[in-house]
Image: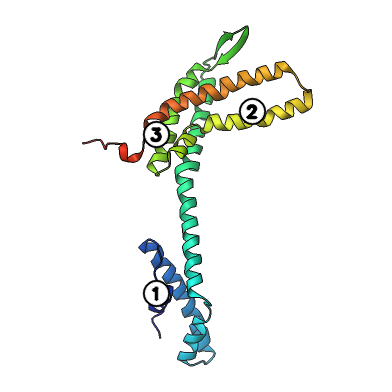
Amino acid sequence: MPDWKKLVQERMGALDLPPAARNNVVDELAAHLEEIYETARSQRLSEEDAVEFALQDVRDWHVLAADIQRAKSEDALMNHRTKSLWLPSLLTLLGASASLMLIQFAGLQPRLVWIAHTGILLYWHWLASLPLFGAMGAYLSLRSQGSIQMRIAAALSPALVMLITMCLILPWGLAIDGFSFLRFVYFGIGLINWVLLPALALFLGAAPFLREPSCITPTEA
């Protein structure tokens, strides 16, 4: 029986993949070709003809190598984006939401602040907790080698989600109740209360983790 792994390696050429990934590709292709070979042999084809029949299953080895390279690169990119952006963003959002729920459950009341005859309810206790979650999101993204933009997005995810939510709700309110100057005033107050101030608090916590990794000096034991 031919050495299928060797045959695959010879025909695939150099794959710009990590050794473990390259070995997995070679093993899978070798097992596939061996299965075709065994089927051909069971149909009483000679060993030489069975080998040729199996190798014909791959029409162009160079094209196959390029496809595998592209697929592996896309998988690596998606895994990197998940680890450095989506997962830190989700954890930051969950942490900030849980903090607000616990503060409300504990009975800690927001403080009413008057600005130009307009009252704004500010959740000071919640705002004070947000730098911790901003730092968590940026740090988790940094650990996964996320870019500065990814670290900022992960840290500010609670404010960004609220901004998107408010921008989606406003058109519905205008469509149902019609245009109202007062509605835009309340919308602006909501942006300050639930987007701008939380974003500033989250960014304050994230700031220490927004430097390039090469600039961060490891702590000596």
- The answer for how far apart the CA atoms under marks 1 and 2 are is 56 Å
Q: Amino acid at mark 2?
A: Met
- For the point 77% across and 28% down, which residue is it? 175
Residue located at (54% from left, 20% from top): 104
Q: Where is mark 3, residue-wise?
A: 210
Label 2 Cα crowd, 10 Å radius (few <14 / some 14-19 / many 20+)? some
Q: The C terminus appears in which quarter of the rendering?
A: top left
Q: Which residue is mark 1?
A: 9
The circle drawn on residue 166 is: 2
Q: Position of residue 49 (x, y in %)?
A: 49, 90
* First in residue order: circle 3 vs circle 1: 1
Callout 2 secondary element: helix
Expressed as whole percent of the image width and height from the top left, the position of residue 96 reads 50, 29
Q: Is residue 27 placed above or below 209 in the rendered structure?
A: below
Tell me what residue is drawn at x 50 percent, y 42 percent: 86
Q: Which residue is rendered at x = 51% and y = 81% of the image?
A: 36
